[in-house]
Image (tube, rainbow, N blue to C red):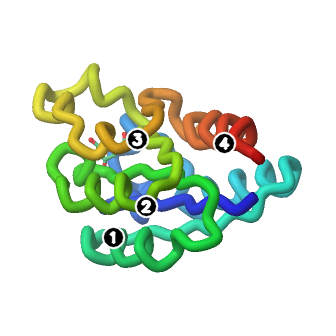
Amino acid sequence: MRVLVLNGPNLGSLGRREPEVYGSRTLADLESMLAARAAELGIQLHCLQSNHEGQLIDWIEREVVGTDAIIINPGALSHTSLALADALRGSGKPVIEVHISNVFAREPERRQMVTAAAAKAVISGLGFDGYLAALNFVTTLRA
Ligand code: DQA
């Protein structure tokens, strides 16, 4: 099973960015934690991060062949991007959207969830463990 993990805008700054909200671990820490768990689960993992909406859409379009599921944290694009939602929906793959923070307990504008409408499930507020939960879940989709 092959899983694509996408992180959107500003998630490359994890560790430095608002540590009181997102913690002190970096994107590299997150990706190595996921790689270790994926190895245990027998999942082939492909992790990518971009600050650009179009780049994320290009990757979804390009990488979707041979991918069984997508785990994505779209960052702030979650609240605005119909284009990203369309790409996720158009992939035809099960999508799990992850947020490190509990977006529902933050500013009201973060409660608008645009890309979540294209997801099978949304995990919000579990910190980095949300990605692990998503990874564990996608194994249940294995043919
Ligand atoms: C986030 C929540 C978004 O509202 C925010 O714009 C982010 C990170 C999260 O992981 O909690 O960039 O997606």
Disc 1 to disc 3, how far (Cα)? 15 Å
The answer to whether mark 4 is within 8 Å of ligand 1 is: no
Disc 4 to disc 3, how far (Cα)? 13 Å
Q: Position of residue 65 (x, y in %)?
A: 57, 73
Residue sitting at x 32%, y 51%:
75
Q: Position of residue 131 (x, y in %)?
A: 58, 42
Residue at the spot of label 3: 119
The residue lying toward the viewer, choosing from 140 and 4, is: 140
Residue sitting at x 41%, y 50%:
73
Residue at the spot of label 4: 138
Depth check, mark 1 against mark 2: the one in front is: 2
Residue at the spot of label 2: 91
Q: Secondary structure at mark 3?
A: loop
Amino acid type, mark 3: Ala
Q: Earlier in the sequence, mark 4 or mark 3?
A: 3
Q: Residues within 10 Å of mark 2 (few under 14, many from 20)?
A: many
Q: Position of residue 60 (x, y in %)?
A: 43, 69
